[in-house]
Amino acid sequence: MAGGVGSRFWPMSRTAFPKQFHDILGTGRTLIQMTFDRFLPLVPKENMLVVTNERYKALVLEQLPELKEEQVLCEPFMRNTAPCVAYASFWIAERTQDANIVVAPSDHLILKENAFVADIELAFKQANESRNLVTLGIKPTRPDTGYGYIQWADVKETPESQVKKVKTFTEKPNLELAKDFIESGDFYWNSGIFIWTLPSILQAFQKHLPEMYAQFEEGKGKYSTASEKSFIANMYSTCENISIDYGVMEKAKNVNVVLSDFGWSDLGTWGSLHTHLQKDEHNNGTVGKHVMLYNCSDTVVHVEGEKLVVLHGLNGYIVVDAGHSLLVCKKEDEQKIKQFVNDIKMKKGESWV
């Protein structure tokens, strides 16, 4: 899934060039390229699909030249993740009646890739044997209010099992509730990574999002033909804007979670990026060729190109220089960046975001 804008990573992430297409960690590979690399041990490259907004098709093909044009499914409008998953599922259904499917965002960070591969393989096995919907839960390291949480129920027969039955989903709790979740021990972060068989997810759409199922079913025979683009354009104009979490996962009773710990972050904010950057002795994390810090601490700096940036006396700040824009913001106020972006649209125009 590569259609998001990542507005909380402004000014680096912009509508014309979102964060999944940036080398945000300074590794030489963009986030979508790192995601592609991560799945090569699990999925043949010819079986990979990228679902993105049609404006990013050229970017996807430029950054992933291993893919054919037909492997990039283009959405005409942003309609959240349920239509994205439905589109890919019906597209696959034109080719096979059964398939193992893993759905993943293109902009996540995973540090322990061998553990990740092992957990996906375990999830594939569980999805095939039980025909349940499976998600990966991440062992929480702090009471984070920016993540959704999954509560799992133990299975008496195999209490030591890594696979659990999902009891509840909770979206982004307040801090007190997040602390309670951590203390309870039976809540994990929701990674947004899903594994299922093709029949299982189609049945789930038919049961929980029947109108959306019917809309995509009307396209049978049109996927991968000259009619696909016009069909998708017409259908998306009336398609419900809803996430796969709200639309399917929270309603379904046949959901399992694989309890995982593979160094995951959704890299949703500059603060989360700071956590994963190499730090100096004052806990400053920087990306950029020419950054000089004096009397600074607990600060994240991201600078593009050859610009020299000298900073003095900052404690707990975000400093981002990208394109024609500069952001300086306290780390504790990073949730306000989304509001800044909305204000910029209103007062300065779309071209700045």
Image (tube, grey):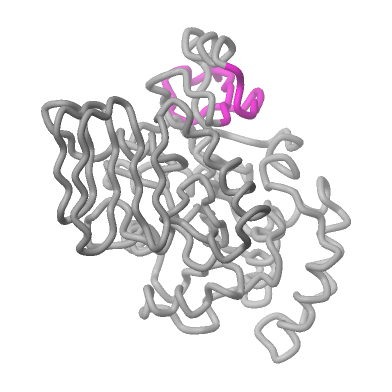
Point out the residue furthest to the bottom here. Answer: 226
Q: Could you tell me which quadrant the N terminus lies in?
A: bottom right
Is residue 81 visible in this depiction of the protein?
no
Magenta-colored stretch includes residue 166: yes
The vertical placement of 199 against 225, above or below, is above
In the image, the segment drawn in magenta is 148-174
For this view, does 295 lie left or right of residue 303?
A: left
Q: What is the residue that sits farthest to the left in this orientation? A: 281
Residue 341 seen by the camera? yes
Q: In this view, does 188 lie above or below 251?
A: above
Question: x, y (%) of residue 106?
Answer: 46, 57
Quadrant assignment for the C terminus? bottom right
**Quarter assignment of residue 311:** top left
Between 233 and 325, the residue placed more toward the observer is 325
Residue plotted at (41% across, 43% down): 267
- Front-lying residue, 98 or 150: 150
Residue 93 sits in quarter: bottom right
Residue located 14% across and 33% down the image: 294
- Asked if the stretch drawn in magenta spans residue 236, the answer is no
Asked whether, in this view, residue 257 is left or right of residue 342, the answer is: left
Please provide percent x and percent y for residue 55: 58, 74
Q: Quadrant of residue 285?
A: top left
Q: Residue at x 76, y 36 (%)?
A: 251
Q: Position of residue 167 (x, y in %)?
A: 65, 23
The answer to whether 56 appears left or right of 308 in the picture is right
Viewer-nearest residue: 316 or 90: 316
Q: Residue at x 27, y 41 (%)?
A: 112
Reply above or below: 109 against 180.
below
x then y, percent, for residue 246: 72, 40
